[in-house]
Amino acid sequence: MNAFGTSEAILNEWDFGRKKEVSLVSGGGHLFTSKFYKEYYTINQENEFLQFSKKYLRKLLASSVISFYAWDDTNHRFEPKIFDESLAPIISYQIEEGIIEWLFNEENPLFLSPERELNLFSKPLYGKLLVLAPLKNLGKPIGFFEVATRRFRPDTLRDRRIQLRALMAILSGLYRSISLKQQMQGIEEASRRIESQMFQSGKLIALGELVGGIAHEINNPMTTILGRLQIIKIKNNLPDVLYKKLEIVESEARRVSKIAKDLLNFARNNPEKDRNEILNMNHVIQKSLDLTRHNLEVDGIEIQLNLDPDIRQFMGNTNQWLQVFVNLLVNSQQALSRGGKIFIETRQNDGELKIWFRDNGPGIPEEIQSRIFDSFYTTKAGRGGTGLGLSITKKIVEKHGGTISVKNAPNQGAEFEIRVPVKEEEEA
């Protein structure tokens, strides 16, 4: 066998190396002409291959009734690429009865009479000849052609069979070459995407460090401001109006200081502190809203909370859960238009805490719902999406023994559900 999966006997009958033109079919003319090879070297896509194959099978076998089934290595079955309705029942029968398997073991075209060899008396195919031609490369099936044609004179059958075997050898190598090119293109595209996402991730890491530095710089002067406000307030001769205004200033200053501290904690990465804090998930959700509230308000997005006041506290990492909720809020924000709503709900059911993030956006197409937690998968390519937010979210939830799932809400929008086991001994 050679690289195209073709026997030496065939190559002796057909000189592939020198592309010798042959004319073996009586009255059929040349098949492997210079025009044939000129077309051959221009083919790079599967649809071009299929058109090329049909053209020369018709020329060789004088038929327009052609089907081609390609082997799907993922699903382990043959899938139709060229479909002819009249041949579909026969091909299903041949696959089920092991005729196709036998065809690939033999590695030679079969010329069958439906009513004699297959005991099939289909009226459209009565008196026809069925031609089965396997495509195989390096011992593995690629696909097969089935052609219904008129019956040939016995003295021309051998010559047609030889040319068909040569044509199948060429088509096998060609289809395999196209498949490899497509795989390489897929690998190159994935490589470029990963490189781009890694670059974006590097920017996010740098941004996290920058946020931490800025938060630290904000927090220091805010501490001084709060201290001076306390000194001013303890004076007894301040008018009531001024005192109340100072209280407002102090309240806002404390809010700025709190946000700065939350940003500082959010930017820090302390893997040693994975699950050694007592958490109240309602409080963590409120912190995540403090971090994102400004952007949500600018976009005109309303937050509606329904938090169970009786949820249990448990051991976990506040910073990581902040990341989970910020990711979900940002994800919803990017899906919503102005005036959109995000609904957040918590419920305690025995030993399990449930958290729902819903929005009234367009929802998530069902065909991609199973992929949105995959690393580097994003529907926002070119718009700042890294494909990492939901992947990291899933990892954090699972690290805490929980699960996260997504579906479309009954009315409209997406719904993320988080379930976290909360043991009795963890309750504070």
Image: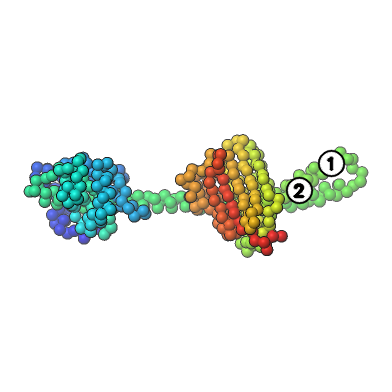
| x, y percent for residue 273 | 64, 62
What residue is drawn where x is 50% and y is 53%?
Answer: 375
Q: Secondary structure at mark 1?
A: helix
What residue is drawn where x is 89% and y is 42%?
Answer: 238
- Decide: few, some or many residues near mark 1? Use Cα within 10 Å; few <14, some 14-19, many ≥20: few
Q: From this viewpoint, is residue 185 visible? A: yes
- Which residue type does callout 2 highlight? Arg
Give the left or right position of residue 142, taking residue 231 as reference: left
Q: Secondary structure at mark 2?
A: helix
Q: Nearer the viewer, residue 293 or 362?
A: 362
What residue is drawn where x is 65% and y is 49%?
Answer: 346
The disc label shown at residue 244, or none: 1
Give the left or right position of residue 242, taking residue 188 as reference: right
Vertical arrangement, residue 222 with respect to residue 316, above or below? above
| Label whose residue precedes the other's in the sequence (1 or 2) | 1
| x, y percent for residue 267 | 63, 54
| x, y percent for residue 305 | 67, 44
The disc label shown at residue 254, or none: 2
- Which residue type does callout 1 highlight? Lys
